[in-house]
Image (cartoon, rainbow, N blue to C red):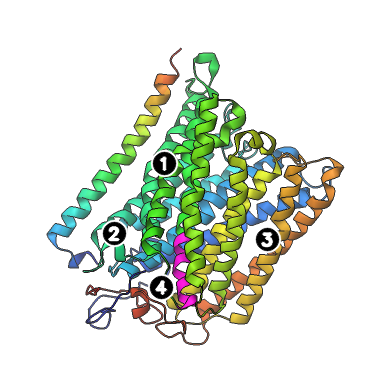
């Protein structure tokens, strides 16, 4: 199914995927960081 | 939904050299086809629905009469916990992902999902997640028993099941995030020429917004359970006051995930109902654009209401006011939706096939759940309702005759398109009426129990609650048994039956999926249709 995609389409798919993965990871790290900041004795 | 017309070979399946499905078990293990993966998600969710339902019946059997009857209190707590986790993450969410896998490419004119291998991976990750969760029931010390919210410090008392349950949640979350990325990337990049955003079917719109919600909140939940894990095994004190942490922090983080999670389950249901009601009213959807904006508004508001789950924890008056009013504000876009569905039916040429019956029941019964939600939004009143059966009644009205009925409506609507066969309408009507009656017998009395003061998550209760509990349990068993009809109907329809036409319904449904033959060919839209 991938064969019919243009280079531009592949690029956009890759770009959007990487961006969304980074957003998800960023949120995960940010919330753990907020826990670390809050839990200082 | 926008009117769509296709040129050329909409199906585009007759000419290409692509192979069909592989045979044997290998097809299902390695498939990257969106229809196969959609089917696997739907079958998985049905299995989980029956498993989670069986756990609910254990709960209702114990609550049939006052006194301890069948199980010990620890196992009762395990049942309430795992029932919820299985139903939320194993049944409702995968069912809507299954529908998305089947329908989104067909509705936007795409040949498949944008990331087919990741699609396969995210499904099998879910299977691994739930295998772990189910296995955790057999660990020393029993299964997870702190409620689906996994509040510390109670959850930290879980035995050997704890790491399994936490790892299962991580895997299920990773699976959801991957599924969401796939859906967003597909919708943003693989729409047919001419399919602008505001021409997309409502089901696609609601899923696009849901996928963004999932990416925003699933990592939050993952972060919370990671911190639980380190508190348990690495002596951190994120949620322990003894080391400078705060157990209430967990509740804030959990509900920052947990409230949008409710909309993750219900927005795709809104999309399904928005497809079905126009078809069987033989009218276009009233206020398409306002439906889109209402969906986006609900998603936005879902991020600023989380502490309404925590009024009794204690917070400043300004906080209570803010969370009370922002919660009430959600009634506005939701009201727009209910109004638009009703206006779509107004002066329509209505017929009542099984998908429409389920959609109508959704409309009435979800609204009941919405109204009781509005009652709980009022902070001083919530002090009375909190942790009572009124809450149980509320969220079950939203999730069972709400989300589950909409999913069933969607299955009844699209099943002939998937299998190429019509199902037994008479039996489907029986399934509907039995479900609609028993779901109310099951959950409506729980409002009375809650208002009378019966706490949730208890295996025994005062004799004053006996009558309504008995009625609720009868409803539970009736509802559970009625679902066997659904299993039989789906199985029978997959095996054979009267041939379905490409439009399936006499009502001439609109949308690209109905331009395809029934059953939809294994590969569709290799040549993109043009949408006017």
User: Decide: marks 2, 3 in contact (CB < 8 A)?
Assistant: no
Q: Is residue B419 magenta?
A: no
Q: CA distance from mark 4 to mark 3?
A: 30 Å
Pick the residue in front: B309 or B341: B341
Which is nearer the N-term, disc 1 or disc 2?
A: 2
Q: Secondary structure at mark 4?
A: loop
Q: Which mark is residue B81?
A: none
Q: CA distance from mark 2 to mark 3?
A: 36 Å
Which residue in the protein does label 2 denote? B186
Which residue in the protein does label 1 denote? B217
Q: Secondary structure at mark 2?
A: helix
Q: Going 57% across and 54% down the picture, which residue do you hit?
A: B399
Q: CA distance from mark 1 to mark 2?
A: 20 Å
Pick the residue in front: B160 or B409: B409
Q: Which residues are magenta?
A: B269-282
Q: Going 70% across and 66% down the picture, which residue do you hit?
A: B437
Which is nearer the N-term, disc 4 or disc 3?
A: 4
Which residue in the protein does label 4 denote? B284
Q: Going 36% across and 82% down the picture, which residue do you hit?
A: B517
Picture coordinates of residue B349, whole percent (x, y): 51, 80
Q: Residues within 10 Å of mark 3 (few under 14, many from 20)?
A: many
Picture coordinates of residue B5, whole percent (x, y): 28, 78
Query: Callout 1: residue from which chain?
Result: B
- Above/below status of B237 relative to B271: above
Q: Quadrant of the N terminus of chain B?
A: bottom left
Q: Which mark is residue B439?
A: 3
């Amino acid at each position: 199914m991938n064969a019919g995609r243009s280079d531009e389409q592949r690029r956009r798919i890759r770009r959007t995927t990487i961006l969304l993965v980074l957003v998800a990871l960023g949120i995960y790290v940010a919330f753990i960081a907020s826990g670390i900041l809050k839990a200082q004795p | 939904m926008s009117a769509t017309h296709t040129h050329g070979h909409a199906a585009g399946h007759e000419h290409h050299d692509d192979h069909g499905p592989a045979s044997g078990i290998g097809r299902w293990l390695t498939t990257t086809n969106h229809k196969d993966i959609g089917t696997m998600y739907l079958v998985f969710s049905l299995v989980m629905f029956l498993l989670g339902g069986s756990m609910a019946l254990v709960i209702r059997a114990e609550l049939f009469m006052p006194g301890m009857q069948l199980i010990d209190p620890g196992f009762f707590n395990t049942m309430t916990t795992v029932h919820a986790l299985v139903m939320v993450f194993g049944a409702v969410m995968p069912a809507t992902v299954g529908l998305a896998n089947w329908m989104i490419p067909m509705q936007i004119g795409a040949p498949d999902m944008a990331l087919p291998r990741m699609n396969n991976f995210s499904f099998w990750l879910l299977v691994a997640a739930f295998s772990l969760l189910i296995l955790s029931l057999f660990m020393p010390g029993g299964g997870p028993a702190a409620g689906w919210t996994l509040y510390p410090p109670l959850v930290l008392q879980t035995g050997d099941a704890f790491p399994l349950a936490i790892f299962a949640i991580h895997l299920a979350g990773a699976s959801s995030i991957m599924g969401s990325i796939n859906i967003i990337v597909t919708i943003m990049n693989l729409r047919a020429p001419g399919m602008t955003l505001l021409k997309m079917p409502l089901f696609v719109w609601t899923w696009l917004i849901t996928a963004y919600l999932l990416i925003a909140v699933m990592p939050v939940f993952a972060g919370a359970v990671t911190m639980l894990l380190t508190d348990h095994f690495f002596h951190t004190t994120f949620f322990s006051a003894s080391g400078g942490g705060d157990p209430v922090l967990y509740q804030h983080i959990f509900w920052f995930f947990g409230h949008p999670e409710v909309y993750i389950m219900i927005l795709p249901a809104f999309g399904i109902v928005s497809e079905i009601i126009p078809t069987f009213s033989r009218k276009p959807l009233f206020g398409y654009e306002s439906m889109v904006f209402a969906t986006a508004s609900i998603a936005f508001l879902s991020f600023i209401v989380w502490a309404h789950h925590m009024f009794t924890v204690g917070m400043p008056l300004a906080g209570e006011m803010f969370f009370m009013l922002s919660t009430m504000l959600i009634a506005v876009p939701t009201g727009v939706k209910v109004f638009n569905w009703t206006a779509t039916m107004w002066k329509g040429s209505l017929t009542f096939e099984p998908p429409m019956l389920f959609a109508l029941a959704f409309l009435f019964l979800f609204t009941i759940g919405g109204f009781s939600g509005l009652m709980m939004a009022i902070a001083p009143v919530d002090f009375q309702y909190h942790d009572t059966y009124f809450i149980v009644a509320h969220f079950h009205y939203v999730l069972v005759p709400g989300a589950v009925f909409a999913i069933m409506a969607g299955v009844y609507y699209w099943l002939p398109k998937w299998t190429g066969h019509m199902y037994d309408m008479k039996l489907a009507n029986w399934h509907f009426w039995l479900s609609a009656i028993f779901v109310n017998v099951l959950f409506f009395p729980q409002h009375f129990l809650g208002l009378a003061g019966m706490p949730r998550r208890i295996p025994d209760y005062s004799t004053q609650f006996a009558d309504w509990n008995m009625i609720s349990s009868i409803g539970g068993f009736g509802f559970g048994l009625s679902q066997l009809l659904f299993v039989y109907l789906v199985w029978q329809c997959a095996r054979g039956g009267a041939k379905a036409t490409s439009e399936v319904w006499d009502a001439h449904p609109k949308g690209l999926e109905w331009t395809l033959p029934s059953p939809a060919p294994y590969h569709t839209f290799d040549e993109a249709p043009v949408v006017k």
